[in-house]
Image (spheres, rainbow, N blue to C red):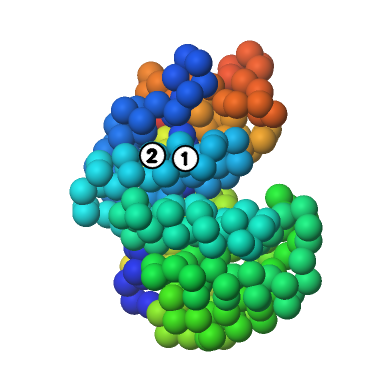
């Protein structure tokens, strides 16, 4: 098992929401405000325009503006990772090259969705991206959204063959697969939980940390969990993790990021709405969410 003592991008990485204004346009000023709040809350890096950031419904030019805005706000305090991947290798490469011009510190690319490539296709896709950009690359494996799983052998092959593929956000939910990744990972390759609720389990196996949704709401609480896990204070880590579990689960009772944006709005943080085909939280969902937020101390 080979994990970096201090991962390149740290241990607690919020997958930032993208704030929208009343017309559902990207609110760059509010994005910078959120980035500052997350940095002050102890975030080790920021991921921009991922699933939680509604990347699929934001046009390329606006994504680039968003990357640039967050880079300016971060001002070198923490690395900024741009999500650039889609299900077309050529488009992913072209967009990744444009993202480099925004000053980001790394890129993330997801397993191609819908076209469901075989393992060799995934390998060639990610290798082509890695060879085309002069930045560290984070792989993103999320079978529930992509319809296909990137197997541990494929991830490890990429980690060995491409020096700038430095991490994977692993959201398969398969702890056996996580174990295989950790057992075979080359020195410096980080395995992150892609699911808040699996953070404790994955870090106990040797994982680096988490790319987190709940950190948008409670960054310092999530930072505490990963720090306790990193220190191998497992009893205290479990107590802190268990406290947040109700909200970790409540945020996903409907499609992400509907409820994490609703949570921020309930806190008065002006996340705005969501773009179609997502829809706003129902009154019942908002009510239940507020109750859980009070339970975990996110609302008074």
Task: Residue 234: give its label.
Answer: none
**Horizontal and vertical percent for residue 258?**
59, 29
Query: Residue beneath label 1, please?
Result: 61
**Horizontal and vertical percent for residue 160?**
53, 86
The crowding category of the residue bearing disc 1, from other C-alpha atoms within 10 Å (few below 14, some 14 to 19, many at least 20), is: few
The crowding category of the residue bearing disc 2, from other C-alpha atoms within 10 Å (few below 14, some 14 to 19, many at least 20), is: some
Query: Are discs 1 and 2 less than 8 Å apart at CB?
Result: yes
Q: Secondary structure at mark 1?
A: helix
- Quadrant position of the C terminus in the picture: top left
**Horizontal and vertical percent for residue 49?**
49, 44
On the picture, is 282 further left or further right than 267?
Answer: right
Give whichever of 81, 58 is nearer the camera: 58
Give whichever of 222, 60 is nearer the camera: 60
Q: Secondary structure at mark 2?
A: helix
**Horizontal and vertical percent for residue 41?**
29, 43
Question: Compared to 267, does 89 lie above or below?
Answer: below
Real-space CA distance between mark 1 and mark 2, rounded to the nearest whole angstrom: 6 Å
Q: Residue at x 73, y 77 (%)?
A: 120
On the picture, is 3 further left or further right than 123?
Answer: left
Query: Residue beneath label 2, please?
Result: 65
Q: Residue at x 71, y 50 (%)?
A: 145
Figure quadrant of residue 31:
top left
Q: How many marks?
A: 2
Figure quadrant of residue 36:
top left
Instruction: Confirm whether residue 246 shows in the render.
Output: no
Instruction: Confirm whether residue 121 shows in the render.
Output: yes
Q: Residue at x 42, y 54 (%)?
A: 99
Q: Residue at x 44, y 19 (%)?
A: 21
Question: Compared to 296, does 202 lie above or below?
Answer: below
On the picture, is 166 further left or further right than 280?
Answer: left
């Amino acid at each position: 098992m080979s994990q970096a003592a201090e991962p390149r991008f740290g241990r607690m990485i919020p997958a930032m929401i993208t704030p929208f204004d009343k017309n559902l346009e990207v609110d760059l000023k509010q994005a910078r405000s959120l980035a500052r709040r997350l940095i002050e809350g102890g975030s080790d890096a920021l991921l921009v325009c991922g699933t939680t950031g509604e990347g699929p419904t934001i046009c390329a030019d606006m994504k680039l503006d968003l990357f640039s805005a967050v880079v300016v706000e971060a001002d070198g305090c923490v690395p900024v990772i741009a999500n650039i991947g889609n299900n077309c290798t050529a488009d992913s490469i072209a967009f990744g090259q444009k993202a480099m011009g925004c000053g980001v510190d790394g890129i993330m690319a997801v397993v191609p969705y819908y076209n469901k490539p075989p393992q060799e296709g995934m390998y060639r896709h990610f290798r082509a991206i890695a060879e085309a950009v002069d930045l560290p690359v984070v792989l993103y494996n999320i079978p529930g959204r992509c319809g296909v799983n990137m197997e541990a052998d494929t991830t490890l092959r990429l980690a060995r063959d491409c020096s700038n593929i430095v991490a994977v956000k692993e959201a398969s939910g398969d702890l056996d697969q996580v174990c295989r990744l950790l057992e075979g990972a080359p020195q410096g390759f980080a395995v992150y939980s892609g699911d808040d609720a699996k953070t404790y389990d994955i870090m106990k196996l040797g994982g680096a940390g988490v790319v987190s949704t709940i950190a948008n709401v409670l960054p310092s609480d999530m930072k505490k969990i990963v720090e306790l896990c990193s220190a191998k204070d497992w009893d205290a880590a479990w107590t802190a993790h268990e406290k947040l579990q109700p909200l970790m689960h409540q945020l996903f009772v409907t499609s992400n990021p509907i409820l994490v944006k609703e949570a921020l709005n309930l806190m008065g943080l002006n996340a705005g709405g969501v773009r179609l085909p997502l829809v706003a939280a129902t009154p019942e969902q908002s009510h239940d969410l507020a109750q859980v937020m009070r339970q975990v101390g996110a609302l008074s």
